[in-house]
Image (cartoon, grey):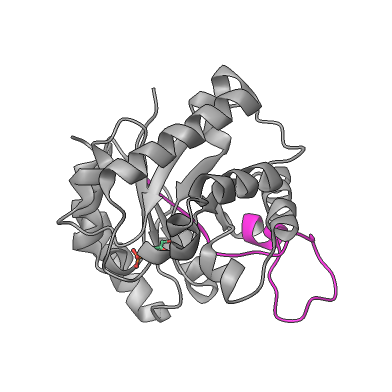
Amino acid sequence: MRIPIVAANWKMHKTVAEAEAYFRKLLALVPKSPGVELVVFPSATALHVAARELEGSPIAWGAQNAHPEPQGAFTGEVSVVQITDLGASYLICGHSERRHIFGEDDAFVAAKVKAALKAGLIPILCVGETLEQREGGQAWTVVERQLSAALSGIELPTPEKLVIAYEPVWAIGTGVPARPQDAQEMAAQIRNWLGDRFGELGKQVRIQYGGSVKPENAQDFLALPDIDGALVGGASLDPEKFWTIAQAALG
Ligand code: 13P
């Protein structure tokens, strides 16, 4: 049984006071047993606010980024160990903004996934093709390369220890989501691949769709057979919209 997982990626938004207000609003909306797993990814400066405000609540939280080395001379970086120390449960790995704006390659993403698992964090591994790659018929080739690189040498003790987010690059922040049938087709291919790679257990790994998800279209994606949740950017900045999207996962 794959429990739906809906996550809020705030990206570079919200001050400490704004984060506090957000969590209080969200906690007032979400019942004790929501029936869907909720995860919030604040900026690094608000992680301690999540730790304090969400303690003992049904809402989990994680970091948008962390360096795979546990410590060292990496000015400006924060390590997976430091994130775990704060109480995080999740880590976004391989987000297209990190791949394309900050030049993170497959090998670095793989190191991050490995370090996250070692530190006890659950990686949300983001994969997805550019528009050019989709139009060139390369979508699956690209996604498969990202999956096999990021998960090479990884063992999966239980399916909950990994989440895959399919986020086509051209759908992120554009207001133009993928067509639901294309998202489903890709999610099914990812699930097959996970089955080949990890066996039966791999087939139970949860797969999210991300890219311009909003309250108006959430149901279109969350009702699809191989999509178990959403990774939401822009629309997740409003706690009411985020909760409305999460509720669409309840069917
Ligand atoms: P948007 O929902 O703003 O398109 O962002 C998606 C995303 O990148 C989530 O990680």
Q: Quadrant of the C terminus?
A: top left
Q: Measured from the top left, where is residue 171 in percent x and y?
A: 36, 63
Ligand 1 quarter of the rendering: bottom left
| Left or right of 123, for residue 28 | left
Magenta range is 59-84
Residue at image x 34%, y 45%? 182
Q: Quadrant of the N terminus?
A: top left
- Is residue 98 something one can see in this rendering? yes
From this view, report whether residue 16 is shown above or below residue 172: below
Please identify the residue farthest to the right as the structure is shown. Answer: 73
Q: Measured from the top left, where is residue 20 in percent x and y?
A: 35, 71
| Left or right of 72, for residue 202 | left
- Is residue 89 something one can see in this rendering? no
| Pick the front one: 201 or 146 | 146
- Location of residue 100 by image quarter: bottom right
- Location of residue 175 by image quarter: bottom left
Please identify the residue farthest to the front as the structure is shown. Answer: 136
| Pick the front one: 81 or 91 | 91
Question: Would you say the magenta stretch is mainly helix, strand or loop?
Answer: loop
Residue at image x 45%, y 36%? 206
| Left or right of 241, for residue 52 | right
Residue at image x 42%, y 78%? 16
